[in-house]
Amino acid sequence: MPKRPPTAQEFVLDELRRLILTGEMAAGAPIRQDALAERFGVSRVPLREALRTLEGEGHVTYRPHHGYQVANLSMADLLEVYRIRELLETEATRLAVPRLTAADLDRLDQAMKDVETAALAGDIIGMTEANRRFHFIVLDAAGMPRLTRLVRILWDATDAYRARYYGSADSRDRVHDEHRAMLTAIRTGDADEVVRLWDVHRAGAVASLSESVS
């Protein structure tokens, strides 16, 4: 079945996310709605709706009389989000690991390979999407939809940080090694080790980003 074309709002939302995550629209840059509407070939209506969605995700900010701008990256913000993620993801992981099926493990293995393939191709967006899939295969297995909804909101808020982290070849190699170790621990059913490795995974990203985010 052919894929249904996106609505104008979905199209604009995807394009704006891409521009922000690739750095084409830099942190702190003002968002010129007229220019973007012309570039995307849409009216201001779907553009405004997409910007409201991005504002809710934390990718853009709005100031009266000034308009929208790309959100600035902040280490304090990142640390707060990652601390909340640690609390929620630890709870979910302990519940999820014993519940993961053979089919889930196959999907994890494929997601891990997709992360590596995208990284080799320099496809940061593809790497971000596959990495998210890898993590949420585990989290969704916890059977706590409210918790995983909250974690998704937190992930949305830090995609720009994640994309910057993936811009480093050393970081990409570290992600691959950590994913392989996590999958090994998951296969053995060692939930404590998976929790420990996820802590290392988050800490590595924070340490790397602390060199470029104030």
Image (cartoon, rainbow, N blue to C red):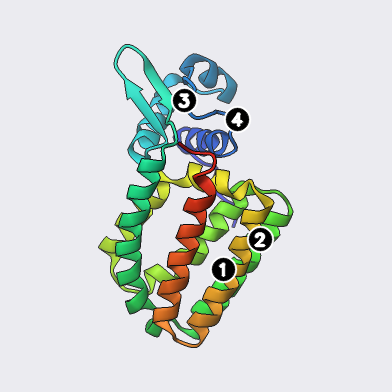
Q: In the rendered image, which residue does mark 4 sit on? A: 24
Identify which amino acid the numbered label 3 is placed on: Gly
Question: Of label 3 and label 2, which has the lower sequence position?
Answer: 3
Residue 29 appears in the rendering: yes
Choose the circle earlier in sequence order: 2 or 1.
2
**Mark 4 burial class by Cα count in 10 Å: few <14, some 14-19, many 20+:** few
Q: Position of residue 89 (x, y in %)?
A: 35, 65
Q: Badge 2 is on which residue?
A: 173
Residues under labels 4 and 1: Cα distance? 29 Å
Real-space CA distance between mark 3 and mark 1, rounded to the nearest whole angstrom: 32 Å
* CA distance separating discs 4 and 2: 24 Å
Quadrant of the rendered structure where residue 59 is? top left
Using the image, tell me which numbered label, if any, was put on residue 28.
3
Identify the secondary structure beneath mark 2.
helix
The amino acid type, in three-letter code, at marker 4 is Glu
> Which dot marks residue 178?
1
Query: Residue at point 40% right, 81% down?
Result: 191
Q: Quadrant of the N terminus?
A: bottom right
Q: Is residue 94 or residue 40 the one in the foreground? A: 94
Sequence order check, earlier mark of 3 and 1: 3
